[in-house]
Image (spheres, helix red, strand yellow):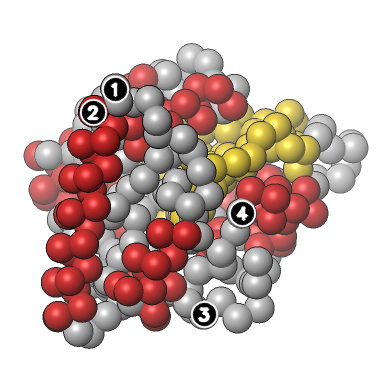
Amino acid sequence: MNTVNVRPSDWLWKEGGGYYTDAAGDLMLRPVLPDVGRLRDRRICALFENHGGLREGSRVLEAGCGRSAWLPFLARRFNCRVSGVDIEPYAAELARANLAGAGAMGEVHCGDAFALSARADLGASFDLVYSMGVLEHYSDVVARIAALSLYLKPGGRLLTTVPNLHGLNWIMQRMADLRTLQVHVVYDPAALAKVHEAAGLRTIASGYAGFFDAHLSSAAGSSSRLRQRLHRSACRVLGRCAEAWTRLGGGRGTPDMRFMAPHVYYVGWRDPLPEGAAGVLR
């Protein structure tokens, strides 16, 4: 793990940056939701079920929510009260549209999720705070995890997933676009647990999640149309192979392993703070 040389990723998340390919109007008509019939989403759903501590009425916050397929899913499946925060106005607009399109209630705030001082009313309010594909973009990750933990109620849980850029996934991303690869810190479960524990979290679980996701890598930062076409073709072929293997074995023979799993995850909980110790991070 090297957090020193990670490059800025702001360009990737802005409208037209290549990461968001949806329009708000389309999401209102055709919302994007996880498909738990597919192994990829079923493994992430299992993290919420097994480690999220969710019950009806739980308050849940997604930091860096973007379009967020999971906020409406959690609202509908677990009857959670969901909120999202994203610094990009376009991403926040997409999240609101996806919630509305899915018929789910929720709040989406546009602002810096790591600056609780800007929305002190949300402090110590959530049973679960989660982020997906966010923390790997920062060199000062311990301070940012500590900031997210301030949203938690005493005993609340923090769930983090980051892309697993080892093995085949690293090869796919390097082939697709070096610029995008360089905006990521590469974590394994031990390294991800280490930075969370340094921020004061108590570990519940960490590991790899998923079998293989051929579309984990991205050529969004590449200016070469040939490279983009080759990457799309490779993703299609590998995706079909992984899907065929999964169906052939009925889900068996699909371990969560370092060489292929799409995600690294961490789940921890926040100790109750001593009286008068609560604060904010800017």
Question: Where is residue 245 shown, x and y percent of the image?
Answer: 26, 36
Q: Amino acid at mark 2?
A: Arg
Tag 4 residue: 188
Image position of 153 (left or right of 99): right
Q: Amino acid at mark 1?
A: Gly
Q: CA distance from mark 2 to mark 1?
A: 5 Å
Image position of 256 (left or right of 250): right
Question: Where is residue 11 shown, x and y percent of the image?
Answer: 37, 77
Whether residue 188 is situated above or below residue 54 in the rendered picture:
below
Label number found at residue 7: 3
Question: Where is residue 72 shown, x and y percent of the image?
Answer: 32, 32
**Does the CB distance between marks 1 and 4 fall below 8 Å?**
no
Q: Quadrant of residue 155?
A: top right
Question: Where is the N terminus found, in terms of image quarters?
Answer: bottom right
Sequence-first disc among 4 and 2: 4
Residue drawn at point x = 11 percent, y = 48 percent: 26
Q: CA distance from mark 3 to mark 4?
A: 19 Å
Label number found at residue 247: 2
Q: Quadrant of residue 136?
A: bottom right
**Does the CB distance between marks 3 and 4 fall below 8 Å?**
no
Name the mark nearer the viewer: 3 or 4: 4
Name the mark nearer the viewer: 4 or 2: 2
Q: CA distance from mark 1 to mark 4?
A: 28 Å
**Does the CB distance between marks 2 and 1 fall below 8 Å?**
yes
Residue drawn at point x = 81 percent, y = 35 percent: 271
Q: CA distance from mark 1 to mark 3?
A: 41 Å
Name the mark nearer the viewer: 3 or 2: 2
Whether residue 17 is situated above or below residue 80 in the rendered picture:
below
Q: Amino acid at mark 3?
A: Arg
